[in-house]
Image: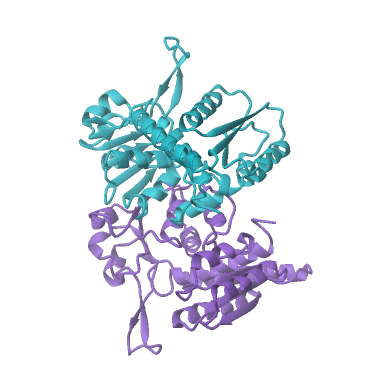
Chain colours: A purple, B cyan
């Protein structure tokens, strides 16, 4: 059994990006610049955004954090999005989700210029992804594929079972993994209305759990020699941890790991890869790799 | 075994649409207006477009056919697209594919105003479809779901196996069928790199063949009591037919049908439903059901 180490891999990627940025700066170009909009004071969101800002620093990017109180209206927030759309100094930006209930996440996402949408959530990007066209790919699915690639875990002709059909993980991952250019795998997507979910899981060469149910995947659901990717990051209150909580994955790691060829830990698996891919997307935005 | 009769169902739908149009006209509104752009003289394309124009007539729609020679340049064609985008008399339009090789289908599709894209091929529509948002859904997948619905073939919690991962059938169908609001099924997509494809097919409660390989699906690949949807329409030269060819589906109908609970014939199955759904999309465009 080998650990797919997202932390070390993400660090390598940040170094690679920093080297590229150094070359850009030497060539007289300005540094890539990522902006993040954060609304309110949700602890998880604050941590995520801070980690993204820190990653920008590691990569040699400029970063700008716009932090608004929960009193901001949808119209005001969309105006801020438009300012970032129009600001030639900003290569890409994200709006950290979730947003307060009085703001439509959908309308905010659709207000983002898709050419700066480094989260890859805008319909133009998800639509182009589906059609196999160049676009910003949302960071978690991209991070999973990159982690597999760097450990040389092949996907072609493999049976991939994805647990979860969310817009930001399950669906784009399924779309990519079935395409010739990304995965060329035989993909099955399972969810809350799937019957005999354990049977489906046992058929997987690669099992990807993205349902946010701690320790849902048990040893009996995994076949010997499978690769298991754990996207879950549920916060479980735990007084013995310094931060007052621990992160729980969707996979019962201790009993599943011994059966696996490869497995991601939580934390230190998919999470760091997600942030590294956001950096990759920002670099691509600065270089106008997908759009002019 | 029951035939899922697309011809009769499509006729019913055309009548329903014609009734709606009658009400619109009585209320002083103008008739829905569909335009079609056709380039060149491919026999298949001519037939398809003529069938669409005829369906418009049956539904009480206005229709406009713009027919260009293969000498038209990409720029000229995109200018024609822009004229239709800007023409307030046109509710929706399609560009009949395939286009000659010197024209990028992708650039032409992306030039269409997504609010008039009744084929549902523009990334904004495919992206919104993926996210479960209101949009134009491409006609073949929509027609298949509608046919199942009208025969009360349930999809929830069913195992659906789709053969083929094309942008216009396999992928959008998979995206819809896995979503709670459309299908809520457990979906597997198979393709040329799938191993043991017969095993995958035998697990299907609903098997949808969309690979364009005549008679690919044989009786041994279908489990007793399954529902089989045949999207294939390959033209096979046949001197004994008046038109010089016959249409062949992806399913070996004669041997598969006796095992099925439900099956679509070719012709007279998915094909007529596709055109009926294009009419539904045009009616929705005229009523601005998805976009303003």
Which quadrant, please, contains the C terminus of chain A? bottom right
Q: Residue at x 65, y 41 (%)?
A: B84
> Does B193 sit above or below residue A97?
above
Q: Position of residue B58 (x, y in %)?
A: 46, 29
Provide residue B245's location: percent of width, then percent of height. Answer: 46, 16
Q: Is residue B257 left or right of residue B162?
A: left
Mark yes or no: residue A133 visible. yes
> Could one spot residue A186 in this view of the protein?
no
What residue lies at 41% left-to-right and 42% top-to-bottom? B142
Which image quarter holds the N terminus of chain A? bottom left
User: In the displayed structure, does residue B99 sit left or right of residue B227?
Assistant: right
Outermost residue, right side: A28
Q: Position of residue B114 (x, y in %)?
A: 57, 48
* Location of residue A211 with respect to B46 vertically, above or below: below
Q: Position of residue A219 (x, y in %)?
A: 25, 64
Tell me the residue at 29%/70% (across/down).
A215
The residue nearer to you, when weighing A210 against B28, is B28
Q: Residue furthest top?
A: B240
The foreground one among B252 and B116 is B116
Q: Is residue B197 above or below residue A194?
A: above
Q: Quadrant of residue B82?
A: top right
């Amino acid at each position: 059994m080998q650990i797919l180490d997202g932390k070390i891999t993400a660090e390598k990627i940040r170094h690679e990006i920093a080297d590229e940025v150094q070359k850009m700066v030497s060539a007289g170009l300005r540094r890539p610049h990522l902006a993040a909009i954060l609304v309110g004071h949700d602890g998880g969101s604050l941590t995520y955004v801070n980690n993204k800002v820190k990653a920008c620093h590691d990569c040699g990017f400029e970063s700008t954090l716009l932090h608004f109180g929960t009193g901001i209206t949808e119209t005001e927030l969309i105006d801020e999005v438009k300012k970032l759309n129009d600001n030639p100094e900003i290569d890409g930006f994200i709006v950290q989700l979730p947003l307060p209930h009085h703001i439509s996440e959908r309308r905010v996402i659709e207000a983002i210029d898709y050419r700066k949408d480094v989260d890859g959530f805008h319909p133009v990007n998800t639509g182009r992804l589906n059609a196999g066209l160049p676009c910003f790919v949302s960071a978690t699915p991209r991070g999973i594929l990159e982690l597999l690639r760097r450990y040389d875990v092949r996907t072609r002709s493999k049976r991939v079972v994805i647990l979860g059909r969310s817009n930001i993980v399950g669906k784009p991952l399924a779309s990519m993994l079935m395409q010739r250019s990304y995965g060329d795998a035989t993909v099955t997507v399972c969810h809350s209305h799937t019957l005999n979910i354990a049977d489906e899981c046992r058929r997987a060469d690669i099992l990807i759990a993205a349902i946010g149910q701690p320790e849902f995947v048990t040893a009996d659901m995994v076949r010997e020699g499978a690769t298991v990717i754990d996207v879950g990051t549920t916060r479980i209150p735990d007084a013995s941890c310094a931060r007052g909580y621990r992160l729980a994955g969707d996979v019962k790691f201790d009993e599943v790991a011994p059966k696996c060829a490869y497995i991601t830990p939580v934390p230190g698996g998919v999470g760091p890869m997600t942030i590294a891919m956001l950096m990759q997307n920002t670099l691509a935005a600065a270089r106008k790799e997908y759009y002019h």
